[in-house]
Amino acid sequence: MENNWKKKLKMYWKGWGCSIFIALIIATSFKSAIADWNIVPTGSMKPTIVEGDRVFVNKLAYDLKIPYTTWRIADWREPQRGEIVVFYSPADNKRLVKRVVGLPGDTIAMLKNILFINGRYLKYEPINDQSNDKASGQSCFMENLTGREHPVMISPYHSPVRSFGPVIVPEGRYFMMGDNRDNSADSRYFGFVDRNRIVGQATAVVASLDINNNYRPRWERFFTKLP
């Protein structure tokens, strides 16, 4: 009886089992080292990314890693200021999506939600009322992050980290912030992010489901580029 079971298992492995196993290894290796998507459960990146968005993560944007590890075997460029990246939080190791604000060597400070980079304050332009959340009183502004414009959201309620610094970003580390400035757990709370913790660059919303409306698709957000 036992020999029959072993024979059947061996036949299955020679037939479909080996092929399925190889296919799984290839698929998971692709997700681990080349490309993936990240489901965003919170509004810390609003209005750029909203709850229920699925963002595409280009894991080859900066380097090539050994699948299933954070070991880099090749580097071609470093994350740039203003880019949105996916990384493992130094606080609890969860995957987060934030914007790169400070590069290694930068001096970063904030005064009443106005960012200062290397002693120069950033410019902010109001966005029309359609981009603002009138129900909650939140307002949106276009932030010019030294040549890269993107929207940020400001809450009417004062957060404890509207002002900080100045701090100098250490070598090999980055300062991350969410676009929803008063509702984001970012480098203001957990500190600088080591380069090895960065998974890849988030470049687009590939799909979006409204988690507050029975997960209905937000078709207008499908396949939209991230600023």
Image (tube, rainbow, N blue to C red):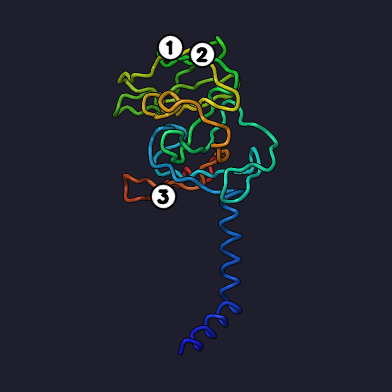
| Residue at 57% over, 38% down | 201
Q: Earlier in the sequence, mark 3 or mark 1?
A: 1
What is the spatial separation of the Cα atoms under label 3 and label 1, in whole angstroms?
A: 38 Å
- Which type of secondary structure does the marked residue at label 1 adopt? strand
Badge 3 crowding class, 10 Å Cα cut-off, few under 14, some 14 to 19, many 20 or more, is some
Q: Earlier in the sequence, mark 2 or mark 1?
A: 1
Residue type marked 2: Phe
Residue type marked 1: Leu
Q: Which residue is mark 2?
A: 116
Q: Which residue is mark 1?
A: 111
Return the x and y of residue 166 as percentages of the image width and height.
Answer: 49, 12
Nearer to us of marks 3 and 1 is 1
Determine whether 110 is above or below 205 in the image: above
Occupied quadrant, residue 113: top left
Determine whether 175 is above or below 212 in the image: above
Q: Is residue 226 left or right of residue 44?
A: right
Return the x and y of residue 2 as percentages of the image width and height.
Answer: 47, 86
Q: Earlier in the sequence, mark 2 or mark 3?
A: 2
